[in-house]
Structures are given as structure tokens and as C-alpha cells.
Image: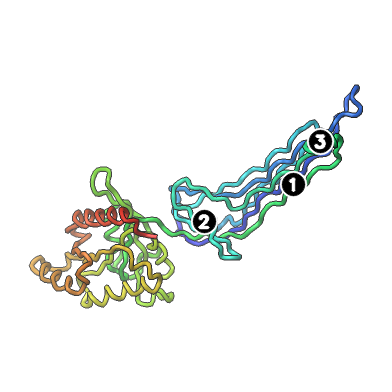
């Protein structure tokens, strides 16, 4: 299924039904009182967050959603039927904006959460409603209220506990495939990841977290270079960021600074997130060279940033990596990190 994270649609709620002007007419009651019923309420258009969805693809091909109008009231005190509502399902993590004003309408960040986009028009009152002791034969009724029409933009920002940050071919997809059931595309060339993917990582019984893999970042990603800017938004809500730098890098410190700079240029709040550096592809080094290389690379990373060398292919230190990430996730959630 194609990953789609930005869609614009049009919605319109139904107008309310008109109230009825009617009087009772019976054989022995030629001047019966008013009995015009009320009009029905117009149908509304609303959203619900569905945890089984991870893309906005359905809304790309179905962009117009018009709810049913309310039915008119009738005589014999019969109210009109309400118009049918429309409920649209979107992935958890969807941001909803008014396309024309760019006003934020709301965000759906919890499974089952709902949000109204266009509320149906109120039905008009029939003449029976206006009957009183001083006005016993009202001959007027209310029209129904009009519906609401607006253009809506959906923007999906994936919700994950850990977000992977790295250059193309840093080993992000291989790591996700090794520690979760996700199967992102893996190949020996840059930009094999063209769309984000999520994986659930099990640590121990009843302990798990969600990890997100996004396309590789290159220098200038925040300006639109490569694929990074299109998907950087998907790590805005991650609790912890894992920077991946492969052991064959000759410029560990510069690589880390470049990745951090791209995140800062995209959104300064990214720097507030807890982060960790993983030295990937440890299997490329001979066993006797690994400790020496890691000590040297560690000096290129700020002292307060935890690091760990690992190999997804050879399954070296993966269990330790999962547990370390789990500890960071729990700690970040305790202190309310993320946005």
C-alpha cells in the first residue's frame, strides 16, 4: 500500500429540514390546532482515529464528502428524519487544518479519538412549536439552517517512541528489520527507504516500543534536498532519537554535527529530545579492532550523549541496544518529553 501523508479534501454538512405548517383536520374538529412537525437535523461530517490505518491513501482518491440533508417536518406532529452522518477514518497522528485559513482544527493522537469537521444544520421548528395561549393558530414555521462547507487538509505525523536519524545507507532499515517484525526495503544503495515505516520492538514480557524508520537525511535536507524534508515531520513526535553512524565513517564527529544541524534547522525543538548514537555495521571491523575504534569514535560525540556499537546483520549488541532504548523511552515519558 502506498504511503500518503498529505491530502486535501472537501466536506459539507447537510442543511436542516424545514419545519411544517399544518393544522389538524378531522370530521368533528374543523378548526383543529397546529400540528406541523419540526425539520430533521442535517448530517455531520466527522473524523475518528483508526489505529489500523497508517496512510491517508483512501482520502487521496475520495476527496468529496457531502452529508445528507435533514428531512422536512410533516403534519400530524411528525418530525423530519435526521440526515445521515459521515464518519471518516484517519490514522492516529493526523493533524487537521482548514485549507483556506491554515487554522489548526485539531489533532487525533489517541485511538478512537473523534473530531467534528462540519456540523449539520439545525432543523426548523414547525408551527406546533409556536402555539401558545395568546397565539393559538401560528401560521409560520422555521426554515432549516444551512450546512457548513469547507476545505480540509490532513497531514499525518507518525507516532513512534524511537525515531531513527541517519544518512542514506547508515543501516536504519536493517536495524528495524532485525529488532521488529517490520520488513522495510533493504539494498546496498542509497535511498532504498522511500517512505516511513514502523516496527514494534519487544524487550521483555509486556515491554515494547514503536520504532520509526524514515528516508535518509543528507546535508541541506531542511531546504528540500534529498527526501529528508518530506519526512522529517515524522520524527517530531518521537520520544527518543537514535542517530546511526556506520563504523566505516571517517568523520564521525562531523556526521553527527550535520545530522543534528539538519534537525535544528527544521525545528529547534528537536534538540530538546533525548538522543542516543548507535555505531552501526560493527561486523565490518575485525573483532580485535572494535574496542579501539569505538573508544576513538566515542571522543567525537559529546560526553553526555550515550553511544553503543552494534551490528544488525551479525546480531551484535542488539539486545543491549533494545534495553537501552527502552530505558530512554520510559524516562522520557516520565518527564513528558516530545511534542
Q: Is residue 21 visible?
A: yes
* Outermost top residue: 28
Percent x, y of residue 200? 32, 51
- Between 141 and 255, the residue placed more toward the observer is 141
Q: Earlier in the sequence, mark 3 or mark 1?
A: 3
Quadrant location of residue 42? top right
Separation (CA) of disc 2 from disc 3? 42 Å
User: Tag 2, which secondary structure?
Assistant: strand
Is residue 236 shown left or right of residue 105? left
Look at the image and name its color scheme. rainbow
Quadrant location of residue 265? bottom left
Percent x, y of residue 2? 46, 58
* Outermost left residue: 288
- Between 217 and 81, the residue placed more toward the observer is 81
Q: Is residue 227 visible?
A: no
Separation (CA) of disc 3 from disc 1? 19 Å
Please tell me which residue is depicted at 31% across the width and 71% down the height of the picture.
Answer: 167
User: Tag 3, which secondary structure?
Assistant: loop
Q: Earlier in the sequence, mark 2 or mark 3?
A: 2
The C terminus appears in which quarter of the rendering? Answer: bottom left
Is residue 31 shown left or right of residue 235? right
Query: Mark 1 Cα within 10 Å, few/some/many (few <14, many 20+)?
Result: many
* Residue under pointer 1: 144
Please tell me which residue is depicted at 25% across the width and 69% down the height of the picture.
Answer: 245
* Residue under pointer 3: 131
User: Tag 1, which secondary structure?
Assistant: loop
Q: Nearer the viewer, mark 3 or mark 1?
A: 3
Amino acid at each position: 500500500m502506498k504511503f500518503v501523508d498529505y491530502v486535501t479534501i472537501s466536506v459539507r454538512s447537510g442543511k436542516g429540514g424545514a419545519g411544517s405548517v399544518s393544522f389538524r383536520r378531522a370530521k368533528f374538529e374543523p378548526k383543529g390546532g397546529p400540528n406541523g412537525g419540526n425539520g430533521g437535523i442535517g448530517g455531520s461530517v466527522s473524523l475518528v482515529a483508526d489505529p489500523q490505518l497508517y496512510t491517508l491513501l483512501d482520502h487521496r482518491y475520495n476527496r468529496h464528502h457531502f452529508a445528507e440533508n435533514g428531512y422536512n417536518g410533516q403534519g400530524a406532529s411528525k418530525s423530519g428524519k435526521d440526515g445521515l452522518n459521515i464518519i471518516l477514518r484517519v490514522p492516529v497522528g493526523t493533524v487537521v487544518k482548514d485549507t483556506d485559513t491554515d487554522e489548526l482544527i485539531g489533532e487525533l493522537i489517541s485511538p478512537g479519538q473523534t473530531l467534528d469537521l462540519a456540523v449539520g444544520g439545525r432543523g426548523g421548528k414547525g408551527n406546533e412549536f409556536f402555539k401558545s395561549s395568546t397565539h393559538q393558530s401560528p401560521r409560520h414555521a422555521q426554515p432549516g439552517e444551512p450546512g457548513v462547507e469547507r476545505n480540509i487538509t490532513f497531514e499525518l505525523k507518525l507516532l513512534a517512541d524511537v525515531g531513527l536519524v541517519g544518512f542514506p545507507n547508515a543501516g536504519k532499515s536493517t536495524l528495524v528489520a532485525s529488532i521488529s517484525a517490520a520488513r522495510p526495503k533493504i539494498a546496498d544503495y542509497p535511498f532504498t527507504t522511500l517512505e516511513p515505516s514502523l516496527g514494534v520492538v519487544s524487550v521483555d514480557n509486556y515491554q515494547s516500543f514503536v520504532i520509526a524508520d524514515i528516508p535518509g537525511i543528507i546535508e541541506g535536507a531542511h531546504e528540500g534536498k534529498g527526501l529528508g524534508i518530506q519526512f522529517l515531520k515524522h520524527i517530531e513526535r518521537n520520544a527518543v532519537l537514535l542517530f546511526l553512524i556506520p563504523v566505516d565513517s571517517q568523520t564521525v564527529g562531523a556526521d553527527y554535527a550535520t545530522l543534528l544541524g539538519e534537525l535544528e534547522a527544521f525545528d529547534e525543538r528537536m534538540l530538546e529530545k533525548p538522543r542516543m548514537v548507535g555505531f552501526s555495521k560493527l561486523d565490518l571491523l575485525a573483532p580485535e579492532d572494535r574496542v579501539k575504534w569505538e573508544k576513538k569514535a566515542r571522543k567525537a560525540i559529546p560526553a553526555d550523549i550515550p553511544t553503543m556499537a552494534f551490528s544488525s546483520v551479525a546480531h551484535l549488541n542488539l539486545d543491549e541496544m533494545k534495553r537501552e532504548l527502552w530505558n530512554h523511552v520510559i524516562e522520557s515519558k516520565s518527564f513528558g518529553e516530545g511534542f
